[in-house]
Image (spheres, coloured by chain):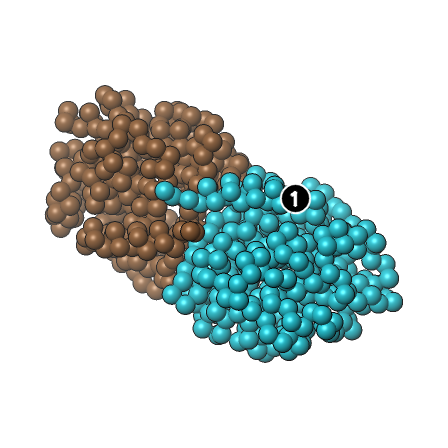
Chain colours: A cyan, B brown
Amino acid sequence: MSVLVVGSIALDDVKTPKEARTNLLGGSASYAAVSASFFSPVQLVGIVGHDFPQEHVDLFEKRQIDLAGLQRAEGPNFRWSGEYMDNMNNRETLSIALNVFEDFTPDLPDSYKQADYVLLGNIAPSLQLHVLNQLESASLTIADTMDLWIDIARAELDELVKKVDVLILNDGEAAEYTGESNAVVAGKKILAMGPKYVVVKKGEHGALLFGEDEFFTCGAFPLEEVVDPTGAGDTFAGGFTGYLASLGKSEPSVNDLRKAVMWGTVMASFNVEHFSADGISHLDKSRIDERAELFRRMCAVE
Amino acid sequence: MSVLVVGSIALDDVKTPKEARTNLLGGSASYAAVSASFFSPVQLVGIVGHDFPQEHVDLFEKRQIDLAGLQRAEGPNFRWSGEYMDNMNNRETLSIALNVFEDFTPDLPDSYKQADYVLLGNIAPSLQLHVLNQLESASLTIADTMDLWIDIARAELDELVKKVDVLILNDGEAAEYTGESNAVVAGKKILAMGPKYVVVKKGEHGALLFGEDEFFTCGAFPLEEVVDPTGAGDTFAGGFTGYLASLGKSEPSVNDLRKAVMWGTVMASFNVEHFSADGISHLDKSRIDERAELFRRMCAVE
């Protein structure tokens, strides 16, 4: 089954303690779409400006991503600039220029409306809801979010959380959203708000999956160096959704969800090894499968 | 096979954001010995003062712990006082009174010298080395440590690390010991110093096991509330060692070590649910087995 991915498509300037890079491919939809494309056909919804480099469009096409929903506008592209401090665990946003994204309305091409698996990447909850409202019969809807929307768009986020099947967020966001610093309590509180499943990502400490009578704890793939964490969460969500869609089920099982957390983890581990989406854009499925098998063995007890 | 446990036996005053308790049973050997006793016969080496309450000795006896190595001195017992801040992740030591512990030399009774499994609980590395030097033919030696010894007794700690089979420490200590904030790099660095295995504990985020060509990542048992984290690491080490000894092997396999991490995790989860050792002292094996099975299912992917 195919995956509909909506989110931002950005040009990023990223500074880490070791290096600074400018004009990189970024944005939640970019990472998620490329990541999902290794598992399932992907339909992309997003907007780019006149200055969006053709090489990034080429990447989407190389990954056979359906671009019927890619809007091209006259103005300059959405831009984000950020800096990572210390051991990559703290990030500061230096600047945001919404540009063409300011007037973005994610209207779906007709060919997208019957999407089975839908990943609402990290954008304003109002836009995520707009996509939800155009869907005719999705099997599974998955939303990612971030602290910004908890701060400035909580009412819309609450509405979204009620309607999606899976909410993905990180531990800091779960704490902020619920007022609970204990990740187990926070995850259960969000679950009670409506989703069938909640995934709480913990970066280098892995991820937790919550469902009704379901709790799964999964470590992270061990990495000795993180080059650029940008997009790790989006890449996780893309791998998670792409894997589930690849199963072709109208309703994935709890065990499918657990495996999806592991595939998302593996995809995110590739992503943070390089700047931008470079860690995932040149992968082939055999390298992914190889790392996934290694990771499976790292987590297994006989 | 039996487990020899050496460490401190303390009387603790503990303050958490919710409650303060005084005169509690504490100390690395107390937690470790009680925890290990659910899996294997335990031989205890430690020292208590004239004011050490009989009820705690009764607990050791109830757990059928061999007290031939328990020294009783005239002076007052070793005392520790600490306070937990915020969400239990930060601890401050308010006071330490070594008292009878100041002159403690862990001489082994003859009946202990052929111990197969030896847990060198958290005490000065020089004392841990003194125990090591009295052993005749241990199958597996396991040492726990803490930041204090990294600060003030690094040379002795280095010597100990060279000689033991397994070193257990937490992520903050691993970072301090190696100067590496990345837990994967830190774990490998310590492994290169001599032990066959290194366990890096990460509290609510679980634990990592390092060995030659071996990496295992294990989550924590999910708890909605932590009442008192004191002794969690010692309880982990006790469960870890007790389980391994219960297998009766002269050399446990990598998979045995993985399971030991899980049993240690389960024991620690009981411990932090109550003050002092109350969370583990009244357990029975069926409750432990039940939680272990639940935890196994929380970590498993079919």
Which amino acid type is shown beneath numbered disc 1?
A: Asp
Q: Chain of mark 1?
A: A
Report the side of B181 relative to B191 (left or right).
right
Rendered residue at 63%/76% (across/down): A136
Rendered residue at 17%/38% (across/down): B41
Which image quadrant: the C terminus of chain A?
top left
Rendered residue at 78%/50% (across/down): A22
Rendered residue at 66%/58% (across/down): A41
Which image quadrant: the N terminus of chain A?
bottom right
Please state the horizontal and vertical placement of residue A93, each as a whole percent of the image.
69, 58
Report the side of A196 relative to A276 (left or right).
left
Please state the horizontal and vertical placement of residue B270, each as a whole percent of the image.
29, 54
Please state the horizontal and vertical placement of residue B4, each as a whole percent of the image.
22, 33
* Category of crowding for the residue at label 1, using alpha-carbon neighbours closer than 10 angstroms: few (below 14), some (14–19), many (at least 20): few
Disc 1 is placed on an element classified as: loop
Camera sees residue A236: no
Give the quarter of the image for residue B40. top left
Q: Which residue is mark 1?
A: A284
Q: Nearer the viewer, residue B219 or B144?
A: B219
In the image, residue B116 above or below residue A80: above
